[in-house]
Each structure stands twice: as C-alpha cells, then as structure tokens.
Amino acid sequence: MLTWSIDPFGVDANVMEPIHKAIGIVPLGDLSPLIPKIVAAHIESYLHLDADILPAEDLPAVAYSRRRLQYDAGKMIAFLESRPSTGHEKKIALLAVDLFVPIFSHVFGESRQGGAWALTSVFRLQRQKNGSIPAPETLYERTAKVALHEIGHLFCLVHCDDPLCLMHFSGGLSDLDRTPLQFCRYCAQYLREAKF
Amino acid sequence: MDDKMKIMIVDDEMIVRDSFRHWFEKIGHEVDTAASGPDALKKLEQTPFDLLFVDIKMPGMNGIDLLQRIKADFPDTTVVIITAYGSIETAVTAMKLGASDYLLKPFKPDHLTLVMEKINQQRKLTSEYRYLKDRLEHITRFDNIIGNSAPMEKIFDMIPEVAESDASVLLTGESGTGKELVAKAIHAKSRRAKRPFIAINCGAVPDSLLESELFGHKKGAFTGAVHDRKGFLEVVSGGSLFLDEVGEISPKMQIDLLRVLEEKKITRVGDSLSIEVDFRLISATRRDLQREVAQKRFREDFYYRINVIQIHLPPLRERKDDIPLLVNHFLEKYSRETVKHVDRVSADALRRLREYSWPGNVRELENVIERAVVLARSRTLGIDSFPFLKSGPAPEPAGRTLQEVELAHICRMLEENEWNISRTAGVLGINRVTLHKKIKRYGLTPSFPSSE
C-alpha cells in the first residue's frame, strides 16, 4: 500500500518522499522463502498492517565476529540504518545465522525502541533444546512470535510483565513456546495508538 | 512498589554499556552509564541509583574496589558484578563484599532475567521489612508496651534514662496498667539485660515461704528443706529483681530486704555464711505507699530505699487515645492464636469501647478482645461481641450521702410504678406505712394524679 504524506502547511506533496505505511520484510542471506511469507501473514493478521516482502540481500560482513563466530546484532542494525531509506519506515530483516549482543551468548532477535530496523533469526528457533528438529509449524510459530515482539519494540513498546503477552521477554525456547501468539489488551491498545 | 528501577552500567567497553542500556530500556528502566569507577561514584554522589552493574576489570579503579566504596558510602544500592573472566574466586570475593549477584559474560538472556527477578524480590522484601520495622519500632518501642498517647510517650522517654542508672525503681499504677512490662523494658534497656530478670509476686507468696524464696536455705533449716537451695537474690546475680505487690511485704521482711539493699549481702536461711549479691531492684504496687507509710503500715526507710525513681502508669481511662491501637494489637494477636479471621471492630463498638471506664485497665481490654474473638462469628466485632457495653455506662450515683441516694431511688421507683404505693413498697421491700412516712418526710409529690 503506497500513500503520500500530506503537509498541512501546503508544501507541495510531490517533492516529499513516499512513505509506505507497511512493514518491509527483507530476507538476509540464505533463508527458506516460506519464512518471509509466514511473517508477512502474521503481521497482517496480528498487527493489522500491510507487509511487503522486499528483495533478499546479502548478510553484512561488517557485523560478523570472528572471535564469537556469530553476527553482532547491534552492528548489523547500525549498518542497516546507515543506508539510505528504501521508503518503508519500519523494516524487519529475517536471517538464518546466529545473532549475539556483547553481553549475551545469543539473541533470537534484536531491535531498538522506536528504531527503523528489527532483526529475527531462525538459527536457534529451528532446533529443540535436545538438538532435534522441531515440527515445521513450531518453527513458524516461534519465528512469528519473535518477529512480532521485535516489531513491537519498533513501535516503542517495552517488555510486558504479563507472561501471556507477546511483549513478555522470552529468554529461552521453553519461555517462547509458553508465550501465546497474542498481545495483552494493554500492549494491543498501545500498538493501535502507536502505529506509524 | 514500582518495579521500574534506576540502573547504572559501569563498564569501560562502550558496546557492553550500550547492550545493557538497550536491553534495560526495553523493560522500561531508567538507565545511565559510566565508563569508570570514579565516573560512577561522581554520578552516585549526584543522584541515587537502585542498581549498579559493575565490570570487574576496568583500568584505574577495578570493580571490586568500586564495590567496596559503594557498600561503604551508598549501602542501599544493589550491586551486580559482571566479569568476562569466569573466575569463581573473584565472584566469591564480590559476593562476600556485598554484591547481590554476579554475571559471567556473555550470559544467556534468561540468566539476566532471573537475576533481575531476584533483585526485584530482594528490593520488595527490604522495602517491606523497613516499613514494618519502622512501624513496629514506633508502636512497640519497649517490648510489648503499646501506645502513642501523651502520658505513654512520657514513660517511653523515661525508660531509657532510668535504665542507664542502677537506682531502685518504684512503679505505681492500678492493676492491669502494665507495670511488669515496664519493669521488663527497664531491664532490657539496662546493662543488666543479658543477666536474669526475676519477678516475684509478693502478695501471692506467704511470708515464711517468701523468705526462703528470696534468701535460699541451708539443708535442714526447716522441715522439708532436704537440699541446699539458692534464693532468687542469689540466682538473679547481675540481673534485675522485680518485686510485684511490694506493699504486701510484711514489716519483718521489709527489714530483711532493707539490710540486703544496704549491705548487698545475704545469708541463706539456716546458714551463717554471708554471700555477696548484685541486683537492681524494681518494685511495683497499686497501693498508695505514701499513705501506708503515714499510717505506719509500711516502713518509711524501706519506702525511701525502693522509691529512688518513681514511674506512675496511667490507667487506661486516662489514655483513651491508645484504645484503638490496643484493640488492633489484641485483635491481631488473638486472631492469630485462634486461627480465626477476625480483623476489624465496628466504628460503633470502637466508640463504645473508648467510652468505657476500664476498671481492669489494659488487662481487662485484652481479656475482652480475647473473649470476643473466640466467640466471633464474623470477621467484624460489633457491639454484640461486647455484652458489657450494651447496658451502657453505670449511672452516676444520685448523691454521696445515704439520704440523697435513698431519696433519688424512692422517686425513681414511684415514677416507675406510677405512684402505686403498694406496688412501690413491694419493690422497695418496705411496708406501705414506712413508704408514706418517707414520702411525707421528703415532701414528694406525684407529677401526675395517683391511681390510688
């Protein structure tokens, strides 16, 4: 969905950048093509926002840590935000590599409060704690939960105390699996008011 | 208590500070950062922080040094140590120095969540503990003596002063005003606190027995004395002796005790050896000992010896402001003891409890609440729970002389019986002629026509 932002003070709208009131989904590196479609479907049904799947891009090498053999989520977001905007105000990058932030051993996803880019990695979501491979629907549900949680942060939502809310912090897979695919009524209301 | 905290991250690596800040901002905490120990201390001087994450290895002042400074200067601040070196010794040292927890980076995200939950729990408990301790200390500053009325405040002020000296104390006041509690409080605040506190009710022990109880006896001193026995004056060694109902002590015993107080020595009954004793005497009486002295019923020299400092405990009717506090205290006590959920007294009942004269003082109030809780059928005690309140306060007597009382009583009975002379005489237990004579003598006339 493409809309134009109208300046109430009469500036010519044609000279303004077009703003997509939709979430841009960018696959980074090798990723099953089904994952972006699943995330898009969840954004549309849970956030009531349009989602555009954008062309895949390479993983930014600058974010790779040779010492930890993982990608630094903070550096990756900084890199993505440093590039010229493609028109979508809020975007989520989906990837299949392991992400970390310096203090944590790993993260499932990362974003900044009110930022433009969020990340979601399926790397640790596609394995059970015992190393076995989960049923595909489990992976899809986990990915959707992490993606919706990170997009929540892009709209300035903070972690929620309610363990039955998607904005509740999940430190591990069991926490994530316990969290239902829904926002509590407070976070849902906040999202309704905060959208774009 | 609000779960949101003011947090400072102290780490020389910017990426670590930023990682922490981003993470805590997502929870909604207020976050500040410092790149070094001195920088952190400067910020702490300016504004208080609830929680600090401190890296162990920093150039200049290291994390352990900073932890020690924080614990010395800002003891209320919680500190979590972070280390990349995974040395368990450092973590143990940090915990011994007062760190609440430690994190070995990089840590799993849920580990930080657990640490935060634990810290939140600790903060809640600490805050609740402080609040309750303050409340309790204020209300029961001296053991179980409850009250914040002006007369009790005066007593609370006196207790520590009196406790400092070794002078004999005489506690006066009606029965049930808490004389023994004050005696115990004086003992507890004195340098003798770790030594025994022995209480004897002199009114309840026969004179002959009191002598042996206080002074002890030698085997064979009297029939039944089959062993040597230490008396309380010996056993109390270094502690405080509380003589309740001291006014009941016989003149002979008064002389014996006077000698002990002067010489600080005793001789067991049936023995000739004197033993040195060291105790502080606290006495209590509900009698007016000064009047007893004037009437030669109590020895003057003994009176002055035991009455170096006098504390008068006011009757409950003179400290009515304490009644709601006492009612609540006893309500909680007996609800707990009887495992019954009774936690309030209706406003009406409380008003009537305040109005009541409480001849038995706090002890009577305690018994009344205990009875009411035991019999309670709901969580609220109403007027019905206190049957003695239903009859209302006792009517003031009509006068002081018998004649005044008789006149008022005859009048009331005549009114009640509508001036029916035969019926009134029957109620009063006198014959009609006598009643007629009294009516004539007092010049009584009916306020309405007589039916007779």
Image (spheres, rainbow, N blue to C red):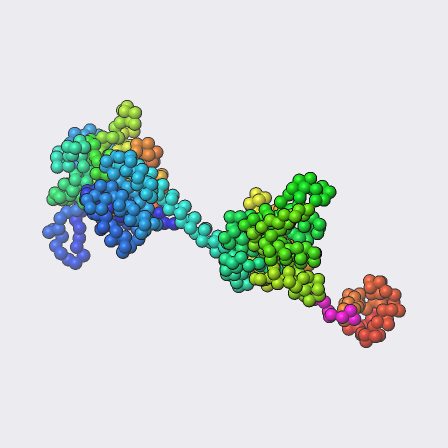
Tell me what residue is drawn at x 60 percent, y 49 percent.
Answer: B275
Q: Which residues are magenta?
A: B396-403
The extreme top residue here reads A132
Percent x, y for residue A59?
A: 14, 34
Percent x, y for residue B282?
A: 59, 56
Tell me what residue is drawn at x 12 percent, y 37 percent.
Answer: A62
Question: As displayed, is residue B387 above or below residue B228?
Answer: below
Residue B421 lies in what quarter of the image?
A: bottom right
Tell me what residue is drawn at x 26 percent, y 27 percent.
Answer: A127
Query: Mostly what secondary structure, the magenta segment?
Result: loop
Q: Is residue A164 left or right of residue A28?
A: right
Question: As displayed, is residue B55 above or below residue B266?
Answer: above
Q: Is residue B287 visible?
A: yes
**In the depicted view, which residue is nearer to us: B446 or B385?**
B385
Percent x, y for residue B337?
A: 57, 44
Q: Is residue B204 left or right of residue A145?
A: right
The extreme front residue here reads B272
Percent x, y for residue B217?
A: 66, 45
**In the depicted view, which residue is nearer to us: B239 or B262?**
B262
The tally of labels here is 0
The extreme bottom residue here reads B443
User: Would residue B378 be counted in the magenta stretch?
Assistant: no
Residue B80 lies in what quarter of the image?
A: top left
Q: Quadrant of the C terminus of chain B?
A: bottom right
**In the depicted view, which residue is nearer to us: B261 or B147?**
B261
Q: Is residue B198 visible?
A: no
Residue A26 lies in what quarter of the image?
A: top left
Tell me what residue is drawn at x 45 percent, y 51 percent.
Answer: B133
User: Would residue B398 be counted in the magenta stretch?
Assistant: yes
